[in-house]
């Protein structure tokens, strides 16, 4: 198994784990990342995004090679779409996970572009 394939499988597993966390053990923590501008209840938003993460993760693991590039772009778009939640958490100083200081919440903002790159690069043909 090559590095790109290992990276793709790790991304899929990470998304499935995060999605399960949305639905179970980390549900309250993820609510801290939902911006107030989202017109749904915070818990509903967390549940829906968890379902999407599980679906994306499973698809990343199982997708045939000829669809990987497109799925990488879709996954990158998902990571971009949830970025306002990270900004909101920073701006509103909401503690969640280990993001319990302004500097940690700020550092988290710089991780999101890395996730986008990981999604796209690990699925390129």
Image (cartoon, grey):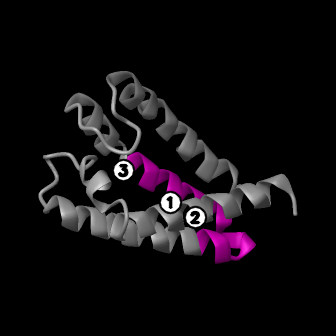
Answer whether residue 63 is visible to the viewer in this image: no
The part of the image, by quadrant, that contains residue 31 is bottom left
Q: Residues within 10 Å of mark 1 (few under 14, many from 20)?
A: some
Q: Secondary structure at mark 3?
A: helix
Residue 64 belongs to the span the image colors magenta: yes
Disc 1 designates what residue?
Answer: 74
Could you tell me which secondary element the residue under label 2 belongs to? helix
Horizontally, is 12 left or right of 25 in the view? right
What residue is shown at x 28% (from left), y 62% (from top)?
46
The alpha-carbon separation of the residues under discs 2 and 3 comes to: 15 Å
Check disc 2 and report the residue beneath it: 71
- The picture places residue 10, in percent across and down from the top left corner, at 67, 59
The residue stretch that appears in magenta: 59-81
Q: Residue at x 70, y 76 (%)?
A: 64
What is the secondary structure assignment of the residue under circle 1? helix
State the residue position of label 3. 81
User: Is any part of residue 33 visible from this angle?
Assistant: yes
Q: CA distance from mark 1 to mark 2?
A: 5 Å
């Amino acid at each position: 198994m090559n590095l790109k394939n290992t990276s793709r499988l790790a991304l899929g597993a990470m998304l499935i784990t995060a999605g399960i966390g949305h639905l179970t053990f980390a549900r309250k923590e993820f609510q801290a990342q939902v911006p107030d501008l989202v017109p749904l209840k915070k818990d509903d938003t967390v549940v829906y995004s968890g379902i999407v993460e599980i679906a994306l993760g499973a698809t990343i693991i199982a997708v045939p090679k000829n669809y990987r590039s497109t799925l990488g772009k879709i996954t990158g778009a998902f990571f971009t779409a949830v970025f306002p939640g990270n900004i909101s958490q920073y701006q509103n100083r909401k503690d969640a996970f280990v993001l319990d200081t302004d500097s940690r919440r700020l550092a988290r903002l710089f991780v999101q572009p890395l996730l986008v790159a990981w999604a796209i690069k690990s699925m390129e043909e």
